Amino acid sequence: MREVGAFEAKNKFGTLLDWVEKGEEVVITRRGKVVARLIPGTSGFDREKAAQAVAGILARRVGVTLGGLKIKDLVNEGRR
């Protein structure tokens, strides 16, 4: 973990981003107090993981019924 002052961070922001891109964490201080942390970002959206989550949700709902009730009747009952 690297620690830099706010003035240095402003002047060397590109260098800070290079460090973070390589996996380092950078702490930015102002007058000796920590005010921010730069940490590596995530790689983004994982389509495979999302597809697995949706498949799991759909698998859980198989066989789940309203026991003969109709959604329209439930909505109307809720309006009373």
Image (cartoon, rainbow, N blue to C red):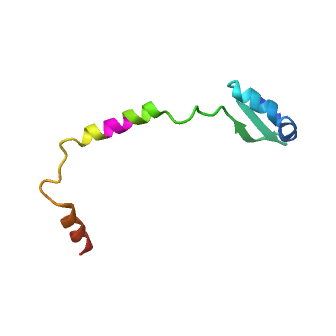
Q: Which residue is drawn at 75% across and 35% down?
A: 27
Percent x, y of residue 41: 63, 34
Q: Which residue is drawn at 32% across and 40% down?
A: 57
The image shows residue 2, relative to residue 73, as above or below, that is above
Residue 73 lies in quadrant: bottom left
Q: In this view, does 9 lie to the left or right of 27?
A: right
Magenta stretch, residue numbers: 53-57
Instruction: Tell me the quarter of the image containing the C terminus.
Output: bottom left
> Which of the pair 45/74 is nearer the observer?
45
What is the total number of numbered labels drawn onto the structure image? 0
Q: Is residue 46 left or right of residue 56?
A: right
Residue that protrudes farthest toward the top in the picture = 22
Q: Residue at x 78, y 38 (%)?
A: 28
Residue 56 covered by magenta stretch: yes
Percent x, y of residue 50: 43, 36
Instruction: Tell me the quarter of the image containing the N terminus.
Output: top right
The image shows residue 48, relative to residue 72, as above or below, that is above
Residue 26 lies in quadrant: top right
Residue that protrudes farthest toward the left in the picture = 68
Residue that protrudes farthest toward the bottom in the picture = 80
> Which of the pair 52/2 is nearer the observer?
52
The answer to whether residue 69 shows anywhere in this view is yes
The image shows residue 75, relative to residue 18, as above or below, that is below
Dominant secondary structure (helix, strand or loop) of the stretch shown in magenta: helix
Percent x, y of residue 45: 52, 36
Q: Which residue is drawn at 21% across and 41% down?
A: 62
Residue 12 covered by magenta stretch: no
The answer to whether residue 1 shows anywhere in this view is no
Percent x, y of residue 55: 33, 36
Residue 36 lies in quadrant: top right
> Which of the pair 8/33 is nearer the observer?
8
